[in-house]
């Protein structure tokens, strides 16, 4: 059984302008030691879905299930959730500066986190553990830096301190929400390396939320592509990049400079903009921007169904589910100009 | 201290094709010390002796990590900052010390596009009046004439001219960035400095803006200085790329030269850190993970500024500041500031510096062994 199994999660917020349907029926599961990458652009609902699981979306209307080790996280009360949050599910957020309290020493914040969940740990012991953790994530002179304030850390060190804090109680699952977006590439490489190594050492499951397909290619085992609050495609890493089915996945990959053919050639952006989550278009949410749009797409919502050759490759699209037929359509509609990946 | 970096620019200084020449530009910012009569206040060495040339119609990419001075250099070029020393020669004229009044005609010729399409547009003003600002400031068009020209430039960047009277909040991120581009284009400038123009945008929208900038370049013969932290974007748009580290250019080369034959270990590490959206390639390549963080620009390291983090560092790197010149068998347009340049095919991920420990940054745990 999977460590975390989310089923048909729906989240909506009532706003003065209308009801924002942020997440509209999302399902996924993560196994121990596995990394699930959730990819999507701003407003695709990728952060809201994991925040909801952690009970961090106040005032939202929520339905669905999120089974973590046999318990439905969405049905737990505040106190029960607190015993899980932090201890069994660790979280890291995008902005490490606003996630750390500027007023308290970094070490103190880790100590507090440890003692919050286990009053039995002595302060001295928790402090020693904090040093050990900072050392683990590669903070130089950890025994001295543990008494620094967050502003004395650089961006990369802060994010590593956040990882240290999230890993303090050996959680079974780590949710990383855009952990490297605010960081430079060289620092990003350091942070991803730390996450990878921790995962290898402790077998932690990771949910990595990002908009950067490069980061996903680097660390994920499974990928879920989200758009307008729904899952468009779900597959293992290589299928996502080399044998994608959904036109949105295709559009995302093709709009990257690395995929746009030779240097200085034109890129292939997805035309238009993402839809408003208050007034979603009928049918497939991607149809107004889709090059393959058919009449059916405008009225009927395509279900997430198995496509291609593998039972675990799911796509929510009315295009032929058979690989050859799908490629035939691609050839007809977008022409040979676009690279079709042969390698599966 | 910066004299040794006054290297030959990559193109002939007398070349008429050169639109912009930056010669040994230095920009220091004083740091508040708190002492009243402090004779020698500390300074941030934001840009410390940079020379560059930009040819007409070309795009020069500027890359480097946060705090390397790339944005400060850009602002020095368009004279949003006054230089501490050095010269900026635009279209044959030295503009580095011109007073504001005499600077004005040049301001029409050089424009800037900013990163944040939310912060760079006044939310309480209508789009038409924002884009019309350049005409108002330079008093070149008013009334109906101004409106006509604003709508013309809106059309040029792919905005609907009928949206003249809307507010920025009514536009999406990508469209707002088009407004920023339109404002920069109002006078058909020769040079546009783009400071992270697509960083705040989603991938699918980013490609729209990159295509727009490319189209405008070929249509209007624009010259760009393009700053971005996304190296794949820089590779896509640039003819040549200058890599900066702690206020200095460490390497400057034509784009494919730089990607295929990086000479400076920093360039090598930077390029190897870029995540590739291709799982097979990503799994195959050697990753060079740098230890530590960028040192303080208030007290930059001696010699080569990269030496405390460099896997190839030797004693020479601590003692002598390397010049920005062609290395190994490179042509005159490929410059690198390194005593021990990376050879083709050399794998520096296994290299270890031979330095006294006090000159190195050492990290424990997971990164140390990686």
Image (cartoon, coloured by chain):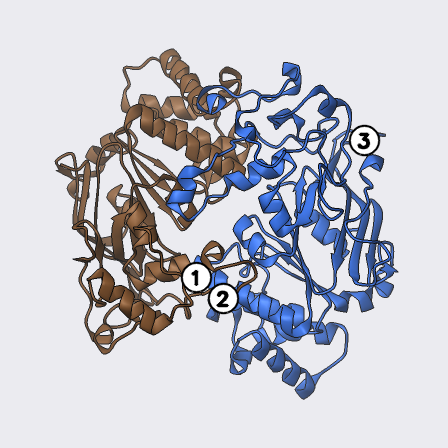
Chain colours: A brown, B blue
Q: Is residue A202 above or below residue A292?
A: above
Disc 1: which chain?
B
Whether residue A125 sits left or right of residue A11 in the image: it is right
Q: Is residue A192 above or below residue B171?
A: above
Q: Residues within 10 Å of mark 1 (few under 14, many from 20)?
A: many
Tags 1 and 2 in contact by the CB under 8 Å rule?
Answer: yes
Disc 2: which chain?
B
Q: Is residue B364 above or below residue A241?
A: above
- Say what secondary structure mark 3 lies in: loop
Residue bearing mark 3: B36
Tell me where residue A163 sits by quadrant: top left
Identified at 66% across, 14% down, the residue is B356
In this view, the residue in front, B16 or B365, is B16
Identified at 84% across, 50% down, the residue is B87
Identified at 74% across, 57% down, the residue is B54
Foreground disc of the pair 3, 2: 2
Distance between the Cα atoms at labels 1 and 3? 53 Å
Tell me where residue B192 sits by quadrant: bottom right
- Say what secondary structure mark 1 lies in: helix
Are tags 1 and 2 found on a single chain?
A: yes
Residue bearing mark 2: B208
Are tags 1 and 3 found on a single chain?
A: yes
N-term mark: 3 or 2: 3
Are tags 3 and 2 found on a single chain?
A: yes
> Which numbered circle lies on residue B204?
1
Whole-percent x, y for residue A42 in the image: 39, 56
């Amino acid at each position: 059984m999977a460590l975390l199994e989310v089923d048909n999660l729906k989240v909506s917020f009532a706003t003065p302008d209308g009801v924002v349907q942020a997440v509209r029926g999302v399902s996924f599961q993560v196994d121990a030691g596995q990394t699930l990458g959730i990819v999507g652009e701003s407003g695709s609902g990728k952060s809201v879905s994991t925040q909801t699981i952690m009970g961090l979306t106040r005032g939202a209307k929520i339905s669905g299930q999120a089974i973590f080790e046999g318990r439905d996280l969405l049905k737990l009360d505040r106190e029960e959730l607190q015993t899980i949050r932090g201890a069994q599910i660790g979280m890291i957020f995008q902005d490490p500066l606003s996630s750390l309290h500027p007023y308290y020493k970094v070490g103190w914040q880790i100590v507090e986190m440890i003692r919050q969940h286990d009053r039995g740990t002595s302060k001295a012991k928790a402090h020693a553990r904090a040093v050990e953790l900072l050392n683990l994530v590669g903070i130089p002179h950890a025994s001295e830096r543990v008494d620094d304030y967050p502003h004395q850390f650089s961006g990369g060190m802060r994010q590593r301190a956040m990882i240290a804090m999230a890993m303090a109680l050996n959680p079974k699952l780590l949710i990383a929400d855009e952990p490297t977006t605010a960081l430079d590439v060289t620092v990003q490489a350091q942070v991803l390396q730390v996450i990878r190594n921790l995962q290898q050492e402790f077998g932690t499951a990771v949910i990595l939320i990002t908009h950067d397909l490069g980061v996903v290619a680097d660390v994920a085992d499974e990928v879920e592509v989200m758009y307008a609050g729904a899952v468009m495609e779900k597959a293992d890493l290589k299928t996502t990049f080399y044998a994608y089915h959904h036109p949105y996945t295709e559009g995302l990959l093709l709009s990257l400079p690395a995929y746009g053919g030779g240097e200085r050639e034109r890129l292939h952006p997805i035309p238009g903009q993402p839809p408003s989550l208050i007034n979603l278009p009928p049918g497939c949410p991607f149809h107004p921007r889709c090059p393959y749009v058919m009449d059916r797409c405008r009225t009927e919502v395509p279900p997430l169904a198995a496509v291609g050759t593998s039972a675990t490759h799911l796509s929510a699209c009315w295009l032929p589910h058979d690989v050859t037929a799908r490629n035939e359509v691609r050839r007809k509609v977008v022409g040979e100009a676009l690279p079709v990946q042969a390698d599966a | 201290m910066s004299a040794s970096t006054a290297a030959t620019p990559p193109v002939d200084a007398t070349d008429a094709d050169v639109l912009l020449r930056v010669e040994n530009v230095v920009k220091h910012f004083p740091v508040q010390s708190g002492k009243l009569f402090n004779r020698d206040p500390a300074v941030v060495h934001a840009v410390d002796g940079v020379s560059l040339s930009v040819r007409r119609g070309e795009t020069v990419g500027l890359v480097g990590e946060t705090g390397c001075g790339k944005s400060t250099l850009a602002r020095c070029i368009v004279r949003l900052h006054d230089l501490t020393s050095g010269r900026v020669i635009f279209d044959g004229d030295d503009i580095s010390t011109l007073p504001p009044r005499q600077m004005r005609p040049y301001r029409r010729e050089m424009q800037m596009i900013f990163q944040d399409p939310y912060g760079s547009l006044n939310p309480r003003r209508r789009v038409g009046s924002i884009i019309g600002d350049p005409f108002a400031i330079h008093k070149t068009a008013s009334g109906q004439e101004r409106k006509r020209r604003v709508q013309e430039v809106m059309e040029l960047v792919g905005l609907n001219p009928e949206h003249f009277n809307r507010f920025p909040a009514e536009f999406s991120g990508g469209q707002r960035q088009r407004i920023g581009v339109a404002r920069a284009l109002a006078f058909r400038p020769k040079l546009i400095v783009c400071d992270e123009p697509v960083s705040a945008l989603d991938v699918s929208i980013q490609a729209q803006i990159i295509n727009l900038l490319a189209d405008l370049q070929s249509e209007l013969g624009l010259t760009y200085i393009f700053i971005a932290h996304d190296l794949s974007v820089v590779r896509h748009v640039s003819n040549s790329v200058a890599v900066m580290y702690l206020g200095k250019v460490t390497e400057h080369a034509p784009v494919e030269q730089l990607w295929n034959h990086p000479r400076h270990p920093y360039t090598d590490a930077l390029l190897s850190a870029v995540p590739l959206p291709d799982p097979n390639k990503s799994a195959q390549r050697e990753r060079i993970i740098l230890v530590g963080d960028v040192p303080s620009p208030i007290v930059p390291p001696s010699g080569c500024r990269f030496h405390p983090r460099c896997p190839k560092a030797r004693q020479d790197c601590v003692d002598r500041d390397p010049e920005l010149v062609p290395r190994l068998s490179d042509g005159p347009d490929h410059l690198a500031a390194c005593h021990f340049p990376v050879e083709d095919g050399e794998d520096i991920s296994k290299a270890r510096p031979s330095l006294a420990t006090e000159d190195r940054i050492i990290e424990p745990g997971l990164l140390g062994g990686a």
